[in-house]
Image (cartoon, rainbow, N blue to C red):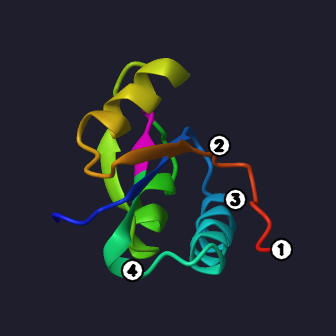
Amino acid sequence: MGNLQLSVIVPAYNEEKLIASALAAIRASVAAAGFTASQWELRVCDNASDDATAKLATEAGAVVVHEPQRQIARARNAAAAGASGEWLLFVDADTWPSCE
């Protein structure tokens, strides 16, 4: 991935109702900031969800990693561990960044 500048990290636990909208907002915000698809990655850590969070994140184009122990710090760290971006941006799964 050589030129990867940004890794957006999203920890998520049972967020099937919000994850698709949150990831769409993240994509729009990153694009509005001027990043091209080859300059950034979207990584979601499914933190032992028992709903469709991981499936929906995958369908939205995110790289999904799994952390079986429920703890937000562990989820953030699990997703960040495989990140390739020069910068890490942590965004919660119930957050909708603004494009403005």
Please tell me whether mark 1 sits on a helix, a strand or a loop. Answer: loop
Q: Residue at x 45, y 43 (%)?
A: 88
Q: Quadrant of the N terminus?
A: bottom left
Q: Quadrant of residue 67?
A: top left
Q: CA distance from mark 2 to mark 3?
A: 10 Å
Q: Nearer the viewer, mark 2 or mark 3?
A: 2
Please tell me whether mark 3 sits on a helix, a strand or a loop. Answer: loop
Q: Quadrant of the C terminus?
A: bottom right
The residue where tag 2 is placed is: 92
User: How would you rate the neighbour count of disc 3 (Cα within 10 Å): few for under 14, some for 14-19, many for 20 or more?
Assistant: some
How would you classify the magenta stretch by its main secondary structure?
A: strand
Looking at numbered disc 1 in the image, what kind of residue is underneath it? Glu
Total tally of numbered discs in the picture:
4
Q: Residue at x 33, y 31 (%)?
A: 78
The residue where tag 4 is placed is: 37
Q: Residue furthest left?
A: 2
Residue 97: image x %, image y %? 75, 60
Q: Nearer the viewer, residue 75 or 38?
A: 38
Start-end of magenta stretch = 44-48
The residue where tag 3 is placed is: 18
Give whichever of discs 2 and 1 has the lower sequence position. Answer: 2
Residue 52: image x %, image y %? 49, 57
* 14 vs 25: above or below: above
Looking at numbered disc 2 in the image, what kind of residue is underneath it? Asp
User: How would you rate the neighbour count of disc 2 (Cα within 10 Å): few for under 14, some for 14-19, many for 20 or more?
Assistant: some
The residue where tag 1 is placed is: 100
Looking at numbered disc 3 in the image, what kind of residue is underneath it? Leu
Q: Nearer the viewer, residue 39 or 46?
A: 39
